[in-house]
Image (cartoon, grey):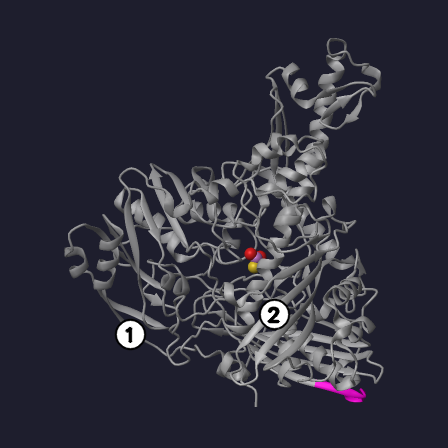
Amino acid sequence: MTTTETRPAPPATVPLDDHIGTPVDPLGAPLDRLDGYAKTHGRARYSADHHLDDMVFAAPVHAAVARGRIIAIDTAAAEALPGVLAVITHTNAPATKKTPRPGFTSPGRQAASSSADLLRTDEVFYDGQPVAVVVAESIDIAQQAAALVQVTIAATTADVDFDRARRGPTDKLSAPPILSVRGKKGDADRELASAAVVIDREYTTPEYTHNAIEPHATTAAWDGDHLTVYEGTQNIDGVADHLAKRFDVPKANVRVLSPFVGGAFGGKSHVWPATFLTVLAARTVGRPVHMALSRASVYRTVGGRTASWQRVAIGARRDGTFQAIVHDATSRLGSTGGHPEQITSCTHDMYAADAIRHDQRSVTLDLVPNTYMRAPGESIGTFALESTIDEMATTLGIDPVSLRLANQPTVAPVSGNRFTHHRTGELLRLGAERFGWADRSPDVRSMRDGNHLVGWGVACGIHPAMRANANLTMSVTADGTVTVRCAFHEMGMGSATAVAQMTAHLLGVPVGRIAVLYGDSDLPTGPAAGASVQTASIAASLERAADALRSAATDVARRHADDLGLRGSALTDAAGGVGDGTRTVGFGELAGRHDDRELTVSVGHDTGWRSLLDQGRMVTRLLREGRSIARAATAAQFCEVRIDADTGELRIARWLGVFDIGTVVNAKTAASQLRGGIVMGIGMTLFEATQFDPRTGRIANPSLTEYHLPVHADVPRIDIEMLDDPDPSMPLGVVGAGEVGVTGVAAALASAIHHATGRRHRTLPITLDQIVPD
Ligand code: MOS
């Protein structure tokens, strides 16, 4: 399946209607997003777009030291400002429960970003921590008043310098068992010592901040002990459970609405301070409160990707086969929270070698807790592993595609687990053919074009495939409309459209007859949109629901066979309904014969012991699969750079990404996801870095003027190829496309730069000043 980036004229009508007549099986079809019309016409209301009656506005006050104790907060000037309703600090905040500690035993703990009890403590744990919140009649007044609050903090020694900390004592990284942060096969150090050729290198990558188009925003309203929250999140259930626990109300009283999310990438997986403070403010002033963070406040209160140090050592024979791979990494956590990243897990699964060892350590810093960011681990881990492979190829005089092909594993290299399917070799071969790789001249600086040094680079990528639980209901009404209800997340990647297509495929009903309700905690609990699990998780439940709906419809058909003109003894599944081999009666007509003119089935359980049982089954399945199989989305990235021989100005001339994501549910949205991952990878390789001042822990560049993201001129045409090969172990064969796109990008680009200039770059980002040729 091939999609090439084009910019067609947008459709003038609502796509939903367009799809009513879709005659073919829509699975894989490049349909427009069902929510595209609302978004392109300004009708989509994001969490900052809700204007509730009597609503007021809040702004945070940030601590300006990295570690210490609040001695005094002078709020007089802020309170004196006309329009200010409240200045809430740890001295006057209404009582709340302690925050659930970050952990994995409940959705509320899983959504905790930090163990810090904001506004219940005088302790400061990182520069930027909110220490007060101002509520006022307008955003401007709230922000002005926030600037007038005088906070006196007695500073104590803070550890904020990753580079210094990682050279000192480090801790064993504790991670949940499903993350392959360490592994061992044979004696890798001994094999390394005896290898014919050894490449042993260190790599560093900086902190990165998510920069979703929609900055974090919350609108919260209390009605007695019922709470409504509009929140852009990828974890509706976690947010609802977390807030219920902190404000001591039943979870059923908390409604979290998140129908539109303007990008998230992992940065909206948790309850970050502003969400909690907005709800607290609403409770304090007894009115709905809205808080939209400034870009700077997002940087300072929402964690991003950890910095990393990595070492990769590869030992090879002269024929290129690997004897040993060693991959070590150190990342950081925050003192009150943060997440391990499986930086070395790519080495667990990507290449065969006689011996392999990979392991991770961590340091704890007095910084905002780090969090998930698109392909946490694999994005930066593949930079180190794949760059070392490129260097090995150069040293051995073997083409980098051939070297990778020579070391493709037949079983998972460390565990020996069976691959559910594994086609990375085909990705490389297909990509090489499409890119014209055979024309690459192997020597560095050998592909000059006028004043441009031309370089071609290649690298592979990987992201594991998992699935979680998805509760949902599926109903059909007498008019033939099928409605799927599930509190999943549409963050711009096309999830809702994919759900409609999978439902249409399973029932044989046109996409235009499918309504999908999502983004609301009052709906059956969906999966979090993380770890690329959402589509496959929902697919599994849709399969079960479609079976149940068919069987309910068949019951109705049997009971009313005579009226319907069906032979009751010969009933059989048919596209769009139930048939008898001669005639088909549609689901709508069958629903019309049913008592309440609607057929509804549900999958999964939201409450009680059945819900616990569902959770237990999911964890058991994850652990069992972890012991027996290896399953992943994989990538082969090819790119061409052109570098001005005098100024070092770099332009990426073209990009080709070839992917195995299992079944392609929607060729357009899947390609866009992968393309977006590549753009994000370009940013992480060439431009982005969150610069924490190593003396103070303050972010020096918390704005889009100083934190450089790729703009249109930095991004070339990106061609995407997808194998569209179902994974036999996954529902509908779906593997997940959210994160694999970013993996391998940094190494492909760094290798292309080396090919062009002869210079290796092992520290990201590779900025212009480092590229200027000799
Ligand atoms: Mo992702 S980094 O699990 O949104």
Separation (CA) of disc 1 from disc 2: 53 Å
Residue, x 77% and y 57% (percent of image)? 629
Q: Quadrant of ligand 1?
A: bottom right
Q: Which residue is mark 2?
A: 653
Where is residue 139? Give x, y as percent.
27, 52
Question: Which amino acid is tagged 1?
Answer: Ala
Crowdedness near tag 1: few (<14), some (14–19) or many (≥20) residues, C-alpha within 10 Å: some
Q: Quadrant of residue 183?
A: bottom right
From the viewer's perspective, tell me whether residue 24 is left or right of residue 480: right
Residue 168, visible in the rendered structure: no
Question: Which amino acid is tagged 2?
Answer: Ala
Which segment is the magenta one? 193-199
Q: Residue furthest bottom?
A: 774
Whether residue 42 appears in magenta in the rendering, the answer is no
Q: Quadrant of residue 125?
A: bottom left
Crowdedness near tag 2: few (<14), some (14–19) or many (≥20) residues, C-alpha within 10 Å: some
Image quadrant occupied by the C terminus:
bottom right
312 lies above or below 636: below
Q: Which residue is mark 1?
A: 154
704 lies above or below 674: below
Q: Is mark 2 within 8 Å of ligand 1?
A: no
From the viewer's perspective, tell me whether residue 138 is left or right of residue 297: left
Q: Earlier in the sequence, mark 1 or mark 2?
A: 1
Q: Quadrant of residue 501?
A: top right
Residue 283, visible in the rendered structure: yes
195 lies above or below 132: below
Residue, x 77% and y 88% (percent of image)? 193
Whether residue 197 appears in magenta in the rendering, the answer is yes
| Residue 735 circle label | none
Residue, x 74% and y 57% (percent of image)? 631
Where is residue 130? Give x, y as percent.
34, 62
